[in-house]
Amino acid sequence: MSARNITRTGQASSCYFRTTADGGTRKALVQIDERCNLHCAHCFVSATRDGHSMPYDDITSLLIPRLKACRVERVTLTGGEPTIHPRFTAIVQALRSAGMQVGFCTNATTLTEAQISELAGIGGVHANVSLDGFRAESHGRFRGDRGSFAVTVATVRKLAAAGLLQGVLCTPNSLAEDEEYRELCEFAAGNGASYVLMNPLSSMGRGVKSRGKLSSGGEHMRRIRALTCSPPAPRSPGMTPASSSSVTSSPTRTSRRGWTPTGSPGGTRWAPTPPAGPAASPGSAARAAPQRSSPPGS
Ligand code: SF4
């Protein structure tokens, strides 16, 4: 595949993963398709409709053996939009047959019901869906296609019904009203998402140009936090603090269970607030979200 430079000279690459793999094992992020049907203002790989798909035969004969040799147990498929790879579900099946957990990051605009059903049947698969606002005028505009919002929302519901939805990935931006982030978190919680990950708009790919105009500043991020978080549950002795103190000033509950920012490098992860009481174990708030990869993009 041809390579696209996603960083600038002198700029450190971001780490795609917010979690670590279990001892002795590894995680891998695999870009199976460079192409994308959308044209997001912040796309960190500057994806367009042009590009290459990783050949299926290369995946089975080269990639998977190499991943196994490297003790990779968890794989996140990304792009571009990974689901537009002509053999997307077959790739997922091949990775699962090799014993790997499979996640994919998607804009949730191209998956068919047949694909969702097939993925659910494979098992051991989860989806992280990008949602950057809760209106066509914000999310859709940010993603370069206002019609994409309704499709993404409908597909999130289908993924949730199939038991595939793990998390929602959000890049807060100046196109969305503050209230939308509360609605977005409610929507995610209502569909059983384990977390909403807020990724700041990075100076990578198209974000280099769009960041100055569209990124959310620190004050905006603090407002979003106040709108979308409930106070963390009381801590038992020795329990690890869940987040910074700004959360505790907000009494807002935005989901059935409440959400707590757990803090992760490069972004903030909103996870359902753990139950209070003596059963809470050290660090349980941070572990409320599954320890899986959540790269930006898609
Ligand atoms: S951010 Fe994701 S959905 Fe948007 S253009 Fe890039 S690859 Fe496509």
Image (cartoon, grey):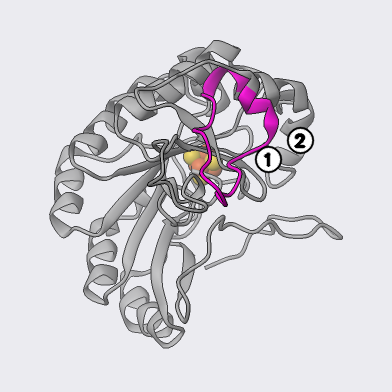
Q: Quadrant of residue 117?
A: top left
Above or below, comparing residue 214 to residue 96 in the picture: above
Q: Residues within 10 Å of mark 2 (few under 14, many from 20)?
A: few
Can residue 91 be seen here? The reply is yes
The magenta stretch is 226-248
In this rendering, position of residue 61 left or right of residue 239: left
Can residue 48 be seen here? The reply is no
Q: Quadrant of residue 245?
A: top right
Above or below, comparing residue 29 to residue 155 in the picture: below
Q: Residue at x 31, y 51 (%)?
A: 126
- Residue 41 x/y as whole percent: 62, 32
- Residue 73 x/y as whole percent: 38, 73
Q: Is residue 246 magenta?
A: yes
Q: Nearer the viewer, residue 237 or 100?
A: 237
Above or below, comparing residue 95 to residue 196 in the picture: below
Q: Nearer the viewer, residue 140 or 157?
A: 157
Q: Amino acid at mark 2?
A: Lys
Q: Residues within 10 Å of mark 1 (few under 14, many from 20)?
A: some
Disc 1 + disc 2, Cβ < 8 Å: yes
- Residue 180 x/y as whole percent: 51, 15
Q: Residue at x 76, y 21 (%)?
A: 219
Q: Quadrant of residue 199?
A: top right
Magenta-drawn stretch, dominant element (helix, strand or loop)? loop
Residue 206 - label: 1
Residue for badge 2 = 209
- Residue 135 x/y as whole percent: 47, 14
